[in-house]
């Protein structure tokens, strides 16, 4: 059976590649078609996931009312046992089948984009859906948006892997999947697209944005076709009663930031407690979290599940302000327990829940004191939903647009912008990392500092440093030191003792104060007297990011490299310029590698790939004069000045690549050659053999 599926996959792949070649499809058209496919898959995935949650919810808490009413009416024993059983099932599924399905899912997608070129295991979508549906359906205090983002992103990655796209294109397709998931969930195509580019990719480049928007729109249309134009919340009509009311929204932004900060801290405190303090097998921990959720739900059933019913009550202004205030803290604890213990689910819906409760209680107080110039508590609840999302995700544009699309009311934009921006500004001051990026930072992935930081960490001192440093003997007199410093090319000069060990370092700044007394001091001072004994050093095993931090912190341009075991044994110097050169070469290498790999796997290289000044790589069909002859006979390198680096053997069974071809390989009619060389010689080679 497996062999049959593999043959079918190979056949479909060959068919696709053949169609691409015949149609000469451009990259832009291909990405648009792929985005449409992902949009449909993302929309269907979101629908199926919601249906799965509803099925498990009714199975766990049967009844004819909404989820909250069913949970409230359930017996105390069911409230406790159902979340515990859910944890017992979810734990082994996540632990043994896909550990990346644990938690809220979005950081895992971001990590794949940063470090793995967008590669996600195809089975992740299925396992994430099962685990999250079980967590939510059995009462876990998490949302469905994070899992849907993970599911959609997995679809995008799977489509990219099937079509063998480049890492750059793969990232865009993953973004398409994330956008499709959010758009289908909230009926908000613009917010879905912005979520993908602002949070998942962090890049608003036009080349990426177009397919993501298309995928988001297609997912929304797909959702409409199957479930209709259903809104997520019953949103009240908004009206700004007075310009003075904007002051209240400014204060509301501060409140939202404080709640977002508390939520982030509690969430990761809970993860630390379960991961480091609780000495229990990981696949059992979700059951413990479920048990605690059930106990909390005995008094506060509102915290179970996604909580949309409670949000609707708050939006209508029907929630008692003190109950709403208490639920803020209870929800933070409940969501932290569910995710921290190893449950699967998102933090987007809990953020909306916290915002609705905070806005409702705040709005009630404001309306009680200033009824003539303030809106209803429901209006503040609506705006605060965006404020807390902005504070937790540090993504104000997404937060503003998603609430705007929920209301389709332009009047809400001004207060919404004030609250979301103020919340984001204060939240970033309280916590530099968002609820997503903090998880990555704890894995030593510094997304806030950009891709360059992660690239710097991948370059090591041993590959960059200069092994021959200009040194000075510590017994050299002042005159010798001055002559060496002035005539030397370097800025810093390590000082060595008679055993060749590092004892200090001298720069021109260290000797300039003595220059006016050079004749007097030339036989008095020696290098050891001038040298700075406290030397900052690095080892070959350190990465370049560590070196840059030491250079920046101490205002230096170079640092001595010493032996890992013997810190006084000098190996050489590493300079800031060397690091920057290595960084640029690594960037260039990654771009060339991804482009070249993409074109190799996409059947043919349709354009020359320039890998250094004056040189390129290209692909041509095997010339007729080559057929039946070997590489050795043709003596291609000597005859034409180009190198054959790869041969593609095209047969009815598919395409096979022969890297580093054997000199005795005999060319056939269906072969194609990937050749490299000077651009002029490549063009001459192609023109000569095509005539």
Image (tube, rainbow, N blue to C red):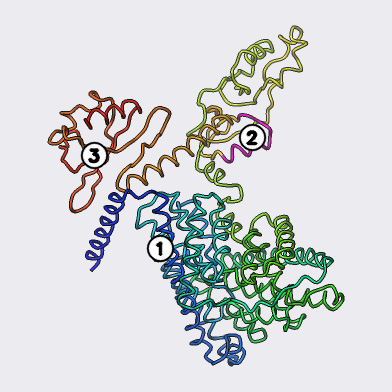
Q: Is residue 103 left or right of residue 2?
A: right
What residue is drawn where x is 68% and y is 67%? 410
Q: Which segment did they paint magenta?
A: 545-558
| Crowdedness near tag 1: few (<14), some (14–19) or many (≥20) residues, C-alpha within 10 Å | some
User: Circle 2 — which element?
Assistant: helix
User: Circle 1 — which element?
Assistant: helix
Residue under pointer 2 = 551
| Crowdedness near tag 2: few (<14), some (14–19) or many (≥20) residues, C-alpha within 10 Å | some
Q: In which quarter of the image is the N terminus?
A: bottom left
CA distance for labels 2 and 3:
52 Å
Q: Is residue 611 left or right of residue 536?
A: left
Q: Where is residue 579 in the image (x, y as percent from the top left)?
A: 55, 33
Q: Quadrant of the C terminus?
A: top left
What residue is drawn where x is 53% and y is 81%? 138
- The extreme top residue here reads 519
- The extreme left residue here reads 628
User: Circle 3 — which element?
Assistant: strand
* Nearer to the camera, 102 or 602: 602
Q: Which of marks 2 and 3 is nearer the N terminus?
A: 2
* Nearer to the camera, 213 or 11: 213
Label number found at residue 37: 1
Residue 366 placement: quadrant: bottom right
Q: Position of residue 471 (x, y in %)?
A: 58, 20
What residue is drawn where x is 42% and y is 39%? 592
Residue under pointer 3 = 621
CA distance for labels 1 and 2:
49 Å
Q: In this view, does 649 lie above or below 15?
A: above
Q: Is residue 619 above or below residue 196?
A: above
């Amino acid at each position: 059976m497996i062999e049959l599926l593999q043959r079918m996959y190979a056949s479909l792949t060959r068919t696709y590649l053949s169609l691409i070649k015949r149609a000469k499809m451009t990259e832009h058209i291909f990405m648009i078609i792929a985005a449409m496919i992902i949009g449909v898959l993302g929309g269907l995935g979101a629908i199926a996931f919601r249906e799965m949650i509803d099925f498990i919810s009714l199975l766990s808490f049967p009844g004819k009312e909404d989820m909250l009413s069913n949970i409230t009416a359930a017996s105390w024993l069911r409230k406790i046992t159902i979340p515990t059983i859910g944890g017992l099932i979810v734990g082994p599924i996540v632990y043994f089948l896909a550990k990346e399905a644990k938690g809220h899912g979005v950081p895992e997608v971001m990590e794949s984009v940063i470090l793995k070129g967008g590669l996600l295991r195809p089975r992740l979508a299925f396992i994430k859906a099962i685990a999250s549906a079980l967590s939510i359906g059995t009462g876990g205090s998490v949302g469905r948006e994070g899992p849907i983002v993970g599911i959609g992103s997995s679809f995008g990655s799977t489509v990219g892997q099937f079509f063998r796209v480049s890492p750059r294109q793969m990232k865009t397709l993953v973004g398409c999947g994330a956008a499709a998931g959010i758009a289908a969930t909230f009926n908000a195509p613009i917010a879905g697209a912005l979520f993908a580019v602002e949070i998942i990719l962090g890049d608003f480049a036009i080349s990426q944005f177009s397919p993501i928007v298309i995928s988001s729109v297609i997912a929304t249309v797909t959702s409409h076709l199957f479930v209709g134009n259903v809104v997520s919340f019953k949103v009240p009509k908004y009206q700004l009663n007075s310009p003075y009311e904007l002051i209240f929204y400014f204060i509301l932004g501060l409140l939202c930031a404080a709640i977002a900060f508390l939520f982030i801290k509690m969430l990761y405190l809970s993860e630390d407690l379960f991961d480091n303090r609780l000495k229990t097998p990981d696949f059992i921990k979700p059951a413990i979290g479920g048990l605690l959720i059930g106990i909390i739900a005995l008094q506060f059933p509102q915290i179970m599940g996604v909580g949309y019913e409670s949000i609707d009550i708050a939006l209508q202004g029907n929630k008692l302000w003190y109950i709403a205030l208490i639920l803020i803290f209870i929800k933070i604890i409940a969501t932290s327990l569910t995710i921290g213990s190893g449950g699967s689910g998102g933090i987007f819906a809990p953020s909306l829940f916290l915002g609705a409760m905070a806005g409702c209680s705040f709005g009630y107080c404001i309306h009680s004191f200033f009824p003539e110039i303030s809106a209803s508590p429901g209006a503040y609840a609506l705006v605060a939903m965006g404020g807390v999302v902005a504070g937790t995700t540090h993504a104000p544009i997404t937060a503003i647009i998603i609430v705007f699309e929920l209301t389709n009311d332009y009047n809400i934009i001004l207060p919404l912008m004030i609250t979301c921006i103020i919340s984001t500004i204060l939240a970033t001051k309280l916590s530099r990392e968002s609820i997503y990026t903090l998880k990555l930072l704890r894995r030593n992935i510094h997304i806030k500092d950009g891709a360059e930081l992660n690239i710097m960490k991948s370059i090591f001192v041993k590959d960059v440093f200069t092994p021959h440093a200009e040194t000075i003997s510590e017994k050299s007199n002042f005159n010798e030191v001055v002559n060496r410093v002035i005539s030397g090319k370097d800025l810093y000069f390590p000082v060595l003792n008679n055993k060749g060990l590092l004892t200090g370092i001298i720069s021109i700044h260290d000797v300039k104060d003595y220059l006016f007394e050079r004749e007097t001091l030339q036989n008095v001072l020696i290098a050891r007297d001038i040298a700075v004994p406290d030397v900052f050093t690095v080892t070959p095993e350190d990465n370049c990011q560590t070196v840059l931090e030491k250079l920046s912190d101490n205002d230096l341009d170079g640092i001595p490299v010493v032996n890992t075991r013997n810190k006084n044994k000098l190996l050489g110097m590493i300079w800031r310029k060397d690091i920057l050169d290595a960084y640029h070469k690594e960037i260039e290498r990654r771009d060339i590698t991804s482009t070249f790999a993409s074109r190799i796997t996409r059947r043919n290289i349709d354009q020359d790939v320039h890998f250094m000044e004056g040189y390129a790589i290209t692909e041509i069909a095997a010339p007729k004069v080559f057929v039946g002859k070997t590489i050795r006979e043709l003596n291609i390198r000597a005859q034409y000045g180009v190198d054959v680096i790869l041969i593609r053997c095209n047969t009815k069974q598919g395409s096979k690549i022969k890297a580093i071809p054997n000199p005795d390989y005999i060319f056939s009619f269906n072969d194609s050659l990937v050749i490299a060389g000077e651009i002029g010689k490549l063009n001459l080679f192609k023109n000569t053999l095509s005539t």
